[in-house]
Each structure stands twice: as C-alpha cells, then as structure tokens.
Amino acid sequence: MDKVLVLDFGAQYAHLIARRIRECGVYSELIPYSTAAEDIDQLKPKGVIFSGGPASVYDKEAPLPDPAIYELGIPILGICYGLQVTVHQLGGEVVRVDKREYGKAVLKIIDTSDLFKDFESTTVCWMSHGDSAKSIPVGFEPIGCTENSPYAAIRDRAHKIYALQFHPEVSHTPRGKKILKNFLFEVCGCRANWTMPSFIEKSVQEIRAKVEDERVLCALSGGVDSSTTAALIHKAVGDQLTCIFVDHGLLRKGEAEAVVRTFRDTLGVKLITIDASKRFLDKLRGVVDPEEKRKIIGEEFANVFTEASIKYGPFEWLAQGTLYPDVIESAASRGPSSRIKTHHNVGGLPQQLEFKLLEPLRDLYKDEVRKIASLLKLPDTIVKRHPFPGPGLAVRIIGEVTEEKLRICREASSIVEEELQKHNLYDKVWQAFAIVGDDKAVGVLGDARCYGYIVSVRVVQSIDAMTADWVKLPYKVLERISSRITNEVSGVTWVTYAISSKPPATIEPQ
C-alpha cells in the first residue's frame, strides 16, 4: 500500500494534511519532525510533506528536520513553515516581513504543470504567516505568487522538491485538495488504494492483537464517536466488551433514554448505566474556570470507571471515542503544538490511570468516523447526530454550573435542534446549540418588567472541526428560535446569535 508521511512541526492543521491525503485514497501517517532520514527511508514512503508550525526558522531552538531527507530522492512538499524550513536549510533566506498575510489571498499561478496542473491563472489560497522567503535556494524557481509573497509557491523540479507558503489542506483554500492530488499522483506517482473499509479491517486486527483475551470497558456517551468505537471494538472482540454509560447530569434532553434504547434494546451490546449526576454536579459547584471544569469532569469519569471496573470487572482496557481534533487542541500530538483547551478524555485524565487506553479512532476526524459508523450499520440517529462534547453542557455554560443554568441550556438547545429539524436544516449544519452564562438583561413579559438570562445560539458549518464558519440561518428560523426560547424557557429575556468563525473562535465556548 502506497503511503505519504507528514512531518509534524507543531501546526494545528498538521494532522489535517494527513487526513486530506487519506481522502484522496492514499494512506498517510503523521510522524515527528525529528525522525531520522534513515528511518523515513525504511518506511518506503512515496512522498514526504513538511507541515506548518508556530516557530520561526531563525529561532534558537527552531524545529528542523534531518537535512539528509533532501538526499533520499523522495518527493517533498513543504507547507507554510515547511516552505521556510526548506528554503532555510537549502541555502535561501527567510525573514520577518512587514506585511504579514493572514486569511484569504489571490494566488497568481506562474506555471500550470505538475503541482498546478489543470488550474486557471489565479486561485484563492489561505495564508497564515509572519515570515517569508526573501531569496530561494539555487535550483528553485517561483511557480506562484501573491501580492505580498513573491515566493508563495516554489519548486526544484529536478529533485522533486516543492513548497507552498499557504495552506492547501484547509477548506478556505478551495482548490487545495486538487493541489495535494497533483502532488500525490503527478509528482509522487501514488496509487489510490486506501479506503475506510480497509481502515476497519486494519483496526479490527490491531484491536484483537492488543486486547487478546482481556476485557474492555468502553466509555459510551451515545454520540457517534463513542458509539463507533464501541461497534468497532465489539466487531473485534465481541463479548469481551462491556459498555458503561454515565449520566453525569450534563446531557442533552432525552439523551440517557435514547442511549439505553439504542444499545441495549436494539444493538444487543452489554450495557451498564450509572447515574452519577449528583457527584459530578457537587464537584463542579463553585467552579468557574473552564480548564478546571474539564479536568474535574475527566478525573471524575476516570473515578467512575475505576469503581465500575472493581464492581463489574476486572477490566484491563478503557476504550474511548477520542478523535484527532480532541488530541490536537489538547496539545497531545507528537509535534511542538500549543494547547488550545483540554478535552476530558485527553488532557483531563489523571496520569495514574489504572487502565490501558484503547482509542481506535484517535487519528480520525468526525466525517471519517461517520463513514465508518455507516459501514458498521449503526442507525442514522447516531450517525447523523451533531457532535456533543464529553464534558457535556458544562462547556456550554459560562461561569459556574448551576441547576438553573443547566435547565435553561438544555431546554434552549433542544429548541434549537427541533427548529432546525422542522426546517430541514439539521443535517445541513455541523453543530447547533445554546449557550448561557451569567449575563442578564431586562425584558418585558406581559406588562411586567423582568430580569433574566441572555441565551446565545451557536450554529456552525464545518467539515472536520478544525475550521468552522457560522451559518447564515434564514431570518424566519432565527425569529422562531428566539420566540420559542423566550416564551418556553422561563428565566430567559434575550436571545443572541453567535457569528464568530473558527478561527479566531472555537466551536464550543469553553
């Protein structure tokens, strides 16, 4: 099977590059930037990609790859910081620029062969850099430029080394996937021989080899991530799997009942339900900091599973529906990333965990997981359900988690989902929910003045959760949502609509 390696220099989008390559039908792995050239050569990749990263090549401790990589004869594509590394190591010059580029830019294509085959003279690209190439190494030539970057795309055709100052892997570069395809198939000569069914087959074999005759405890939330994890592990080890569903009191409306109905009554999977809502809410009382909330919830989850292991076990493995966006935002990746926020099932777990972790979906994104879920014959009610964070409504409540704010958040979120379903919009957006904090505003109900909470509605569109745009809902839908929330959810006087995209915002408020 052909493969392409992505060297991780710490970019938030490093794994997204590997994901885009897999979308093209080519197997890809993310490896540390410091991997020795001889080790890369032994892996026999058809190509190597240098990811972006937050460093500058002229920093004292800048991450740099083994320079012997350039002598392997393997095609190379540098992206953003990857371009700067290539230029720096091969004899060009990289400098801090006065006119930085962040956001969309128009790329003028100088040469429409190989990397830009089948392109017009211009295309839109997504820039995110403060450094730029002042001069390029001997043997290189520019093949694309922007208003502020004369070397936005360069190549050394003889040695099959290419580099881009922009990010082809993000959705904001409309033809970025075509650029990657051209690198894979025109430059590297790859074959498209990797698929989701092959991932399932490979994962089942790996799970069986790891678990052997030991028992697995799966943390089941009812969302597509943990549900697919459970189905995949069940396919591999059958009755060695036991699922535990913990009601931590922070769930969506009707969630607990739906999970039990699906898994125990429909799919026939071993399921234990634990009502731990009081202990979670007691632990969260008085806590305001979002990172502290996440860590408390992660630790309490681990405590619940440890107790369950003693009562129903023994279990040697704890399975979780961790996806790559959880890992990268928690800075648990293999490169020098910056932490955005801790996810309860990544950075929130205590170091002295008494289980071995089994996370078969750890290198995948949500849309890939949905494809696997469909192949495993999970019902559409699970496959198409919007993402829901492990810490639940705790991260959609700004400030202290109180019973009143929980009630408002739960009921308002349910109304948002109901209205989108009524207007045939639910399956067309990535995520939709309500947020409540401590801000209040004056309202008028009937003829009386009242003072109630402000609820913010958040609806976004995304492909992989690494980037997201706010959805421009029809006014009539927004009006209906606002009207229902203020009329049906007591204690609410105002409804606002969040219009921040990711970046600079994140999808969840905390």
Image: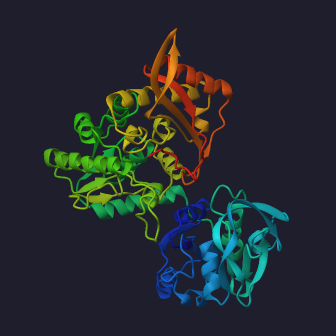
Where residue 360 sits: x, y (%)?
39, 57
**Does residue 179 appear in the picture of this structure?**
yes
**Does residue 218 appear in the picture of this structure?**
no
Where residue 190 sits: x, y (%)?
64, 72
Residue depicted at x 19% and y 50%: 306
- Quadrant placement of the N terminus: bottom right
Left or right: 359 in relation to 457: left
Nearer the observer, 256 or 339: 339
The residue at the far top in this view is 447
Q: Is residue 193 above or below residue 242?
A: below
Nearer the observer, 422 or 261: 422
Residue depicted at x 52% and y 8%: 447
Specify how the rendered protein is coloured. Answer: rainbow
Left or right: 232 in relation to 105: left
Which of the 4 quarters of the picture holds residue 453? top left
Where residue 47 sits: x, y (%)?
60, 77
Residue depicted at x 56% and y 61%: 16
Nearer the observer, 254 or 9: 9
Q: Is residue 355 above or below residue 266?
A: below
Left or right: 122 in relation to 508: right
Where residue 39 sits: x, y (%)?
46, 84
